[in-house]
Amino acid sequence: MSLFGAVSSCSRLCSGVWLLKPGMQKMSSLHTAARCAARDYYQVLVLGGGAGGIAMTARMKRKVGAENVAVVEPTETHYYQPMWTLVGGGAKQLVASARPMGSVIPKGVEWIKSRVTALDPDKNCVWLENDIKVSYKYLIIALGISLHYEKIKGLPEGFNYPKIGSNYSVQTVEKTWRALQDFKEGNAIFTFPNTPVKCAGAPQKIMYLSDAYLRKTGKRSKANFMFNTALGVIFGVKKYADALLEVIKDRDIAVNYKRNLIEVRADKQEAVFENLDKPGVTEVHQYEMLHVTPPMGPPAVLVNSPVSDEGGWVDVDKETLQHKKYSNVFGIGDCTNLPTSKTAAAVAAQSGVLDKTISLVMKNEIPVKKYDGYTSCPLVTGYNKVILAEFDYNAQPLETFPIDQSKERATMYHMKADMMPLLYWNALLKGYWGGPAPVRKLMHLGLK
Ligand code: FAD
Ligand code: UQ1
């Protein structure tokens, strides 16, 4: 979609006043889309057009009317990232995970096609590219988590070589499938970094799919599988960790804990790991296939921002999602310091809570609805098997279905591969899916 096609009705937007930082000249080279996009004030301003940003934009449109809401998002395409596990494993096409950004932004809401460069919550405004200022009454921050391939020596340029892929980025996810198809003989290595990540199960899901693919194609006996993780455990919730360790034993996979990828020598097909238990000690492994989960961190704009904690994450109340200091600022999703696992499922549950929180704040009332930390990770363990992990802030299982979800099940694979995309595009992004709590209550009626 073209820049102008993407921004709904350019002409009606251009009446806005441009505010420049003191001492700045108004530039003739203002970012075209931003120039035609923004008014200088919106009642609700949403930063980020990912899962959380679009879900909240849809909800805010219903609350205050489309003309009073704007969303700042620089990219042209919205991706359903959870599908990338299956894209890397060759079970879905990348194109199926993508929709034009303009098609997911609710009609009538302003799309400010620009990047946020600074936040000034004391003055109720943000700065965009080209020093454009937009003010707000309420601000929702949904900027996601940033990938840092460049923190691994030899990357990202190493992705120009074969045998290496990464499901975490749109540029590299198809390379995973290529590497898997090209596999001949040797080590298949899967990594997990020493930073917070989104979807903490994804680094191992692709390993199980790769194992299944090589078994199907008769090459598994020629492969040595290795999960090199910076963590000291396979998964943070005991019930699912126990189940995964059984899977790992069954599939003949070696797990090396406290191993952190620090360098890729893609020309030689070598991966270098530091041993986090033995400072200074490194290990070099030859690979026939390498799947990289990159280090991640808060978006640059949030680092040292007044809305962030010392780690750079948006500092929100863990139950209401309201900012701890600025009562008209809210955060959702991967960019927040909510102490739960960062997933779209968590975003869904958070969107329902945040909707209620903002409603009450708008009426000058105290937010009451409490987020319990619900998050979920469909742990794909084969082309028709999923362990459906669901849990809360206390790392206690919070399961939707009245069955043992730690068992590998084909029904759960079907739910992950075929039902979840529909739920995402048609319910979460439209602001109608606040997580499975009501389904859970219904499913467990009479069981207590
Ligand atoms: P995002 O959806 O990442 O959106 C952030 C948005 O902010 C982006 O559109 C970005 O362009 C924009 N942005 C960034 N910086 C700026 C800026 N300066 N100015 C303006 N805009 C900006 N979740 C599940 O629930 N289940 C799964 O099975 C699952 N599997 C996954 C597998 C993989 C391989 C990956 C990568 C993710 C997976 N996830 C899964 C996680 C899920 O996709 C994320 O947790 C979810 O998308 C988070 O939503 P968000 O809105 O916080 O961030
Ligand atoms: C979920 O709500 C969600 O967001 C739409 C996901 O992201 C794609 C998920 O992976 C999961 C598992 C859920 C939870 C939903 C149910 C019905 C258990």
Image (spheres, helix red, strand yellow):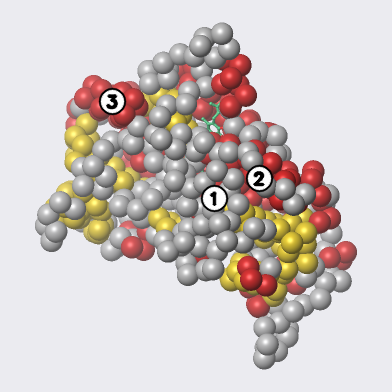
* Residue furthest out toward the top: 446
Question: Which residue is the site of mark 3?
Answer: 242
Within-10-Å neighbours for mark 3: few <14, some 14–19, many 20+: some
User: Nearer the N terminus, badge 1 or badge 3?
Assistant: 3
Question: Which residue is the site of mark 2?
Answer: 367
| Viewer-closest of 236 and 234 | 236
Could you tell me if the residues under marks 1 and 2 are in contact, i.e. CB atoms within 8 Å?
Answer: yes
Query: The disc labelled 1 sits on which kind of residue?
Result: Asp
| Viewer-closest of 195 and 327 | 327
Mark 1 vs mark 3, CA separation in Å = 32 Å
State the image coordinates of residue 278 (x, y, percent, origin top left). Answer: 12, 54
State the image coordinates of residue 416 (x, y, percent, origin top left). Answer: 51, 27
State the image coordinates of residue 16 (x, y, percent, origin top left). Answer: 83, 72
Within-10-Å neighbours for mark 1: few <14, some 14–19, many 20+: some
Residue name at image x 81 percent, y 49 percent: 64
Residue name at image x 44 percent, y 38 percent: 393
Mark 3 vs mark 2, CA separation in Å = 38 Å
* Residue furthest out toward the bottom: 23
Residue name at image x 56 percent, y 39 percent: 371
User: Nearer the N terminus, badge 1 or badge 2?
Assistant: 1
State the image coordinates of residue 325 (x, y, percent, origin top left). Answer: 57, 61
Question: Which residue is the site of mark 1?
Answer: 317
Image label count: 3
What secondary structure is marked by label 2?
loop
Q: Is mark 3 within 8 Å of ligand 2?
A: no
